[in-house]
Image (cartoon, grey):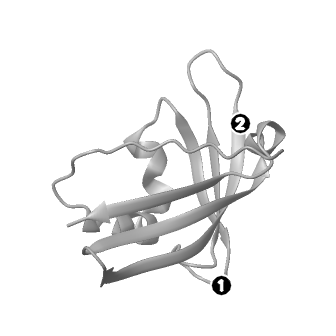
Amino acid sequence: MAQLQKLETKVAMKSPEKIAAFFRDSFTSFPQLVPDVVKTAEVMGGGHKAAGPGSVLLLQYSFPGTPLMSVKLKWEEEAMEEAGEGKKSCLFTVIEGELLEMYKSYSLKIEMDK
């Protein structure tokens, strides 16, 4: 029988709309934000200079005491227009990397409230 696990966390932010703009315009700056964990961040493909829906993103990361790992994410969709309760969201799916050795599939959805 298949299992579905969900981890949900809420974090207060002053400017949630800047989060989506960061992924779109400044994704490669990720290592500067968390240099102890994220080692490289690249936009691999999707026909965009900047990241956006359809892009493939590569992250190489390492937590203290762990080996360097990598993950390729596909930016599946972006719902940036206000919908429902004024939420904005970005959906990423892992398409390659060590996470898929532990999980059959892995997705990350970032929802931002105004």
Query: For the point 38% across and 62% down, which residue is it?
Result: 111
Which mark, residue 47? 1
Secondary structure of the residue carrying numbered label 1: loop
Q: Residue furthest front?
A: 1
Query: Dot 1, crowdedness within 10 Å: few (<14), some or many (≥20)?
Result: few
Per the model, the C-alpha gap separating discs 1 and 2 is: 25 Å
Relative side of 91 to 66, left or right? left
Q: Which residue is mark 2?
A: 69
> Is 110 placed above or below 44 here?
above
Residue nearest the viewer, comparing 87 with 65: 87
Q: Residues within 10 Å of mark 2 (few under 14, many from 20)?
A: some
- Give x and y (percent) for residue 56: 67, 68
Query: Between residues 10 and 31, which one lies in front from this camera angle?
Result: 10
Q: Quadrant of the C terminus?
A: bottom left
Check disc 2 and give the amino acid type.
Met
Instruction: Please say if the residues under marks 1 and 2 sit with CB atoms less than 8 Å apart.
Output: no
- Quarter where residue 100 is shown: top right
Among all residues in the image, which is located at the extreme top? 65
Q: Is residue 4 left or right of residue 108?
A: right
Task: Give the residue at the far left of this rendering.
Answer: 14
